[in-house]
Image: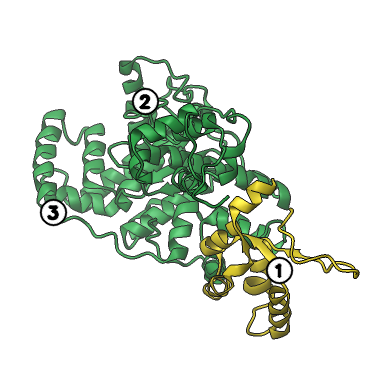
């Protein structure tokens, strides 16, 4: 899935972007690596978000609202900037 | 392109999705708070909705957003090719609520078959069949034997919820998926049989009180039995006259009521309660019905079948009963937990399949939660309930 471009290209190899689906969020926070126990994963994801390298389609947020745990939904709400609006995806489709 | 800009969707898909969901234009216009003419213009391709409006349509129709971007409408089997003939439903004119319930039950059955395949589990066979030339009493007796529920056990059920749970489990053990739905009006439908093999489905309207569901589930199973005997076809193909169909329904009613209250047990109970020469007033009927955990109305019908009441007595009792019922306060539905609701809706066998597939990593947690329409945070509780076999028995959705 293609996403928007961030910043100008440099001489160094581009850093990978992470496009995350609902299952990845669920496996991470709800199933295998709860954020209150595996804090280093949380820190690394926060760092990726700060670098605009951690993204998800807006529909993922909607899906998490339906199936997710309370903590995950709260986390997802607190990181609204990571969601790529559906109309942007449709333009690129 | 912000959400408020028009979006190029296929107008054919807009019309198809609405009609497939059973909605009239005015209901959709009202829901989206747009003028009817605007909606008509969308479907005619003269104007285009915004993305926000297409998202609202997807929610309202319970369809994925992506469906509106298909090149042409999918070709689907008519729903009336799936369910048995229903007395108050005209094929193709099901309410939106019923259409959604049918789609959800069909999807659940497909998912169950897929999960069984993934897990290498055998698909249970539904082995009962009958012909209309047989005695409905004998068919009822055969069904009663097949469900393996001793009358002594039936008499010991402490309440109607336990009775409903026991009948449901017994029917599930016959190789039938039993689902419940909650949004369909009782006037449209109490129960339905989906005539698929293997793994046929019985759907029960959870607006029914539990003792009424006990009758409805057996009624639907008898329809499955007749379909397995090539005596019934799906609604869209069923061409019998009204009178002929009434005879089929009569057969089903007798068979179901004899399965619910076998003749010998009924006679023994009437004698034990000292009702052999009863005039069958409201109170005596309720006492007897309670022993079998069925409704008084079902018991009255049953007594008529066995000659304990004649038609005249039955009509008089029914008149008295209708007056009595009108005086009763509406029964409270009580509170059911999300897990109890999920089990009530999906049935324990399907919930167990989903949990097994999740444990075996055959499906994701998102898929599991979607299949059961249950937030993942409730899954630990669900596991415990499925493992221990104990739950809030209400399970209404």
Q: Earlier in the sequence, mark 3 or mark 2?
A: 2
Alpha carbon separation for disc pair 2 and 1: 52 Å
Chain assignment, label 2: B
Give the residue at mark 1.
A54
Please name whichever residue, A9 or B131, is drawn nearer the observer in this view of the structure. A9
Mark 3 and mark 2 on one chain: yes
- Asked if disc 2 and disc 1 are in contact, CB closer than 8 Å, the reply is no
- Chain drawn green in the picture: B
Alpha carbon separation for disc pair 3 and 2: 33 Å
Badge number at residue B90: 2
Q: Compared to B169, does B13 lie above or below?
A: above
Numbered disc in front, either 2 or 1 = 1
Give the residue at mark 3.
B328
Q: Is residue B175 left or right of residue B209?
A: right
Q: In the image, what residue occupies the spot 52% across and 25% down?
A: B229
Q: Bin the neighbour count of mark 1 within 10 Å (Cα to Cα): few under 14, some 14-19, many 20 and up.
A: some
């Amino acid at each position: 899935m293609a996403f928007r471009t961030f910043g100008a290209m440099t001489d160094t190899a581009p850093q990978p972007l992470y496009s995350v689906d609902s299952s990845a969020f669920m496996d991470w926070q709800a199933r295998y690596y709860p954020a209150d126990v595996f804090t280093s994963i949380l820190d690394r994801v926060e760092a990726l978000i700060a670098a605009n390298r951690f993204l998800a389609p807006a529909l993922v947020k909607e899906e998490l609202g339906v199936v997710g745990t309370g903590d995950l939904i709260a986390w997802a709400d607190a990181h609204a900037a990571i969601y790529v609006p559906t109309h942007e995806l449709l333009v690129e489709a | 392109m912000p959400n408020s800009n028009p979006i190029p969707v296929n107008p054919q898909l807009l019309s198809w999705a609405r009609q497939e969901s059973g909605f009239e234009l005015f209901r959709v216009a009202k829901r989206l708070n747009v003028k009817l003419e605007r909606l008509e213009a969308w479907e005619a391709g003269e104007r285009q909705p915004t993305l926000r409006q297409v998202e609202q349509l997807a929610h309202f129709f319970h369809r994925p957003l992506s469906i509106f971007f298909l090149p042409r409408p999918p070709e689907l089997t008519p729903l009336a090719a799936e369910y048995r003939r229903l007395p108050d439903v005209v094929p193709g004119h099901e309410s939106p609520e019923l259409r959604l319930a049918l789609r959800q039950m069909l999807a659940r059955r497909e998912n169950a078959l897929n999960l069984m395949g993934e897990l290498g589990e055998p698909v249970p066979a539904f082995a009962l069949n009958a012909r209309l030339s047989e005695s409905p009493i004998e068919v009822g007796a055969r069904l009663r034997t097949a469900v393996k529920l001793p009358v002594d056990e039936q008499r010991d059920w402490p309440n109607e919820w336990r009775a409903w749970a026991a009948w449901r489990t017994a029917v599930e053990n016959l190789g039938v998926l039993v689902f419940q739905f909650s949004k369909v009006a009782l006037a449209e439908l109490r129960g339905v049989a989906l005539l698929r093999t293997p793994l046929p489905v019985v759907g029960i309207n959870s607006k029914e009180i539990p003792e009424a569901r006990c009758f409805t589930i057996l009624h639907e199973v008898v329809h499955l039995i007749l379909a397995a005997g090539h005596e019934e076809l799906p609604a869209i193909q069923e061409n019998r006259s009204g009178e002929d169909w009434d005879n089929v329904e009569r057969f089903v009613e007798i068979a179901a009521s004899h399965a619910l209250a076998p003749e010998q047990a009924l006679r023994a109970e009437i004698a034990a309660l000292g009702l052999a020469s009863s005039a069958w007033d409201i109170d005596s009927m309720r006492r007897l019905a309670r022993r079998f955990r069925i409704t008084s109305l079902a018991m009255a019908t049953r007594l008529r079948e066995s000659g304990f009441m004649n038609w005249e007595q039955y009509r008089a009792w029914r008149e008295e009963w209708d007056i009595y019922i009108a005086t009763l306060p509406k029964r409270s539905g009580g509170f059911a937990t999300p897990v109890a609701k999920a089990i009530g809706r999906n049935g324990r066998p399907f919930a167990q399949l989903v949990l097994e597939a999740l444990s075996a990593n055959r499906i994701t947690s998102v898929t599991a939660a979607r299949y059961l329409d249950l937030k993942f945070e409730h899954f630990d509780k669900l596991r415990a309930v499925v493992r221990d076999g104990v739950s809030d028995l209400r399970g209404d959705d």
